[in-house]
């Protein structure tokens, strides 16, 4: 039986705990403990050493907690974003390589049938500009800033666009930044991607081109992902590569957003 520990008692930590419990009988898994970010993790790992630890704490603790487990040879599933910056993420990947433990970063939408429909639609779509929008009301959420919005939502899109960008060079152009909204373009060799996010929208929209990710998927993407990951059946190498590329793009976008806001403030 595969033993699983979970760090994170917030909203999504509970979602993940329920998902693991739902698939436990099918995949011979057992959620042996849950803990808060400030728990004595060393003691927990000694008392009930799991095969996997799920890290679902605030983003600024992801890298530290992941490395603490990986250095003991315990495999890690880490929520997004993987780290606060690219260099920190590389240190997590290196910690996994040293012990040979599995490492997987949340890419739940790669398991969504609507996302697969979006990728398939690109073959029949010659549009020069592809729109990707995610609008929702995040008022009151932890880390409720434009940068938190990019961590929470844009990161997902950035690993999703990897099949579109391919091996070509991509450049980023910021279009608009306010306290609640951000839009930017990713310019690739063949297509332009326009990505936009609103954290105080009155309606919930998650659109990839002509495909809505707000529609119910044919499967449960979260349970499907965790079933593959925790059973050792996922492609960990491809996931790491996609996550590193997404984190690199995210760092660049955050930097450009910071520049935009400084220049806007200076011009007032």
Image (cartoon, rainbow, N blue to C red):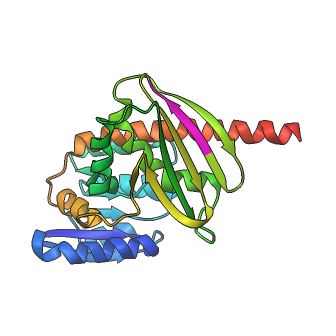
Q: Is residue 191 above or below residue 109?
A: above
The quadrant in which residue 23 appears is: bottom left
Give the magenta range: 183-188
Residue 154 horizontal side relative to residue 199, left or right: left
Q: Nearer the viewer, residue 194 or 29?
A: 194
Q: Nearer the viewer, residue 142 or 187?
A: 187
Residue 7 shows in the view: yes
Q: Is residue 178 above or below residue 97?
A: below
Q: Is residue 253 highlighted in magenta? A: no
Residue at image location 56% in from the left, 67% down from the top = 203
Dominant SS in magenta: strand
Residue at image location 23% in from the left, 64% down from the top = 218
Residue 188 horizontal side relative to residue 227, left or right: right
Q: Is residue 170 above or below residue 19?
A: above
Residue 245 horizontal side relative to residue 5, left or right: right
Image location of residue 127, percent across then percent down: 43, 33
Q: Is residue 192 above or below residue 157?
A: above
The quadrant in which residue 93 appears is: top left
Residue at image location 45% in from the left, 65% down from the top = 57
Q: Give the tally of numbered discs.
A: 0
Residue 225 horizontal side relative to residue 210, left or right: left
The quadrant in which residue 94 appears is: top left
Image location of residue 39, percent across then percent down: 43, 73
Q: Quadrant of the N terminus?
A: bottom left
Q: Is residue 187 highlighted in magenta? A: yes
């Amino acid at each position: 039986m595969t033993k699983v520990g979970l760090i994170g008692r917030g909203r999504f930590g509970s979602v993940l705990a329920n998902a693991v419990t739902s698939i436990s009988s099918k995949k011979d898994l057992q959620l042996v403990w849950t803990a808060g970010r400030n728990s004595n993790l060393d003691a927990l790992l000694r008392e009930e050493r799991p095969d996997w630890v799920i890290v679902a704490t605030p983003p600024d603790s992801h890298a530290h907690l992941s490395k603490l487990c990986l250095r003991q040879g315990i495999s890690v599933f880490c929520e997004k974003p993987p780290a606060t910056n690219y260099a920190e993420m590389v240190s997590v990947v290196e910690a996994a390589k040293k012990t040979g433990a599995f490492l997987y970063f949340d890419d739940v939408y790669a398991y969504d049938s609507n996302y697969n429909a979006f990728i398939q639609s690109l073959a029949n779509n010659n549009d020069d500009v592809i729109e990707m929008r995610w609008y929702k009301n995040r008022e009151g959420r932890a880390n409720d800033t434009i940068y938190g919005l990019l961590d929470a939502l844009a990161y997902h899109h950035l690993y999703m666009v990897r099949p579109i960008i391919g091996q070509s060079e991509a450049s980023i152009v910021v279009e608009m930044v306010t306290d609640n909204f951000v839009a930017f373009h990713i310019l690739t060799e063949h297509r332009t991607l326009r990505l936009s996010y609103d954290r105080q929208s009155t309606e919930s929209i998650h659109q990839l081109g002509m495909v809505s990710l707000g529609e119910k998927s044919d499967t449960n993407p979260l349970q499907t992902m965790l079933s593959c990951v925790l059973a050792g059946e996922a492609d960990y190498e491809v996931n790491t590569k996609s996550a590193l590329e997404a984190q690199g793009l995210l760092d660049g976008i955050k930097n450009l957003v910071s520049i935009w806001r400084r220049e806007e403030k200076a011009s007032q």
